[in-house]
Image: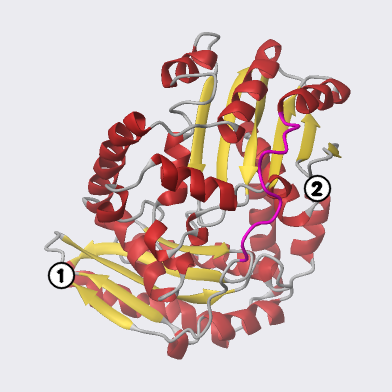
Amino acid sequence: MTYQTHTLPNGLRLIYKPDYSAVSYCGMVINTGSRDESDSEQGMAHFIEHMLFKGTAKRRSGHIINRLEHVGGELNAFTTKEETVIFAIVLNEHLERAMELVSDIVLHSTFPQKEIEKEVVIILDEIQSYNDNPSELIFDDFEEMIFEHYPIGHNILGRAELLEHYTTADAVSFVSKQYCLQEMVFFALGDLNFKQLIRWAEKYLQTDNIQNLQPKRISPANYTPSSRKIEKNTHQVHFMLGNRSYHLYHPNRMGMYLLNNILGGPGMNSLLNLSLREKHGLVYNVESNYQPFTDTGMWSVYFGCDTENATRCEQLVFAELQKLREMPLSENALKKYKLQLMGQMAIANEQKENLALSLGKSILRYGHIANLETIRKRIEAVTAEQLQMIANEVFDVEKLSVLKYV
């Protein structure tokens, strides 16, 4: 992958990859998410993400909305446990306009109290909408179990009783603590001259009004498996099990990606889908997920099914986990699964939005971009014995937590 990087004097990094099409992508990845909130700030990172669109020192909310819409562009944002991302999609000739706007809302937002009062109502509605969907809500509740008593387990949307009292001063305080220039990456994917991008960055991003020392994160420790059942009075039983897993820099990370893909990844030939859906016809959706963070990780299995099928589905899930622990994959099977994962990654890399976002996150987390050939070699290096070892460590039934909505 051909890309270019540059670091401004204030520590903010740039990453650019040429893409010869009519559309450009750009944005900012900020090393701040819901895990960086104190107990009294739950939901603040996501709240700030919303409020970045509501006014800067030189723009009102309507001006922010129309700045790219008037030229057919898009402006969007999202919050995760560890990042806040703001990005834009525009025609090439409007890339400077997009860069200036993203820079303005990230570095110069004012968080007007009048806008806060309106936006809180919207976020509260978002929370209620989410609470009405048990197949999504159970993931948040399960994360709170896995990371109990630690900020990384907090719900990204936050708590309604706290959000209702957030003020301009609260928003300014959080940004002043967490928005560190050295922990930001501006990314761009498009058809332009990199020297021009640097000149724009020096014009719009060269600010020193944000501190350069971010508070240290609290790493979760002392995991104790637990089992809980919550009455939701839903038609289906919703079920999750899982364990803590490997962090972003762990040598077993690629093996865990591959093992999770085999077990319950997006392919219709995943072991869980073949067993629970194709063979036995018990579920519409079953999946497993592996989410690595900077200092820890989480692996989980989810399915929803009719009440009378719940016990059978649980048995089938545990049976597939046991097979992976007891029997190493054959050479042919392992080769097949490796080809599948490499193909999925290559296809995902062709989706321009995904590619642009991965540029920023890769520089933020690793300081470089791994090309597909490097990733292929890492996948090829995974052995059947390594996968079996990972399965015995992560899928150990004595380490698994279980959550059921009934």
The residue sitting at 59% across, 69% down in the picture is 259
The residue located at (45%, 44%) in the rendering is 171
- Determine which residue is flagged by label 2: 371
Q: Indicate the secondary structure of the residue bearing disc 2.
A: loop
Above or below, 117 against 391 in this view is above
Q: Are marks 1 and 2 in contact (CB under 8 Å)?
A: no
Is residue 352 covered in magenta?
A: no
Judging by the rendered image, the residue that carries numbered circle 1 is: 231
Query: Is 133 on the left or on the right of 323, as rendered?
Result: left
Q: Earlier in the sequence, mark 1 or mark 2?
A: 1
Q: Magenta stretch?
A: 205-216
From the top left corner, tell me how far across and down residue 8 is, in percent.
82, 38
Q: Nearer the viewer, residue 319 or 362?
A: 362
User: At 56% from the left edge and 35% from the top edge, which residue is drawn?
Assistant: 86
At a point 26% along the width and 44% down the height, the residue shown is 124
Q: Nearer the viewer, mark 1 or mark 2?
A: 1
Label 2 neighbour load within 10 Å: few <14, some 14-19, many 20+: few
Mark-to-mark CA distance, 1 and 2: 47 Å
In the picture, the quarter occupied by the C terminus is: bottom left
Q: Is residue 139 left or right of residue 261?
A: left
Q: Which residue occupies the foreground of this view, 209 or 134?
A: 209
Residue 83 point in image, percent of width and height: 57, 50
Indicate the amino acid at tag 2.
Asn
Q: Is residue 282 visible?
A: no
Q: Quadrant of residue 389?
A: bottom right
Front-most of residues 157 and 9: 9
Q: Is residue 212 magenta?
A: yes
Where is residue 53 shown, x and y percent of the image? Answer: 46, 29
- Res. 206 in view: yes
Q: Secondary structure at mark 1?
A: loop
Q: Name the mark on residue 285.
A: none
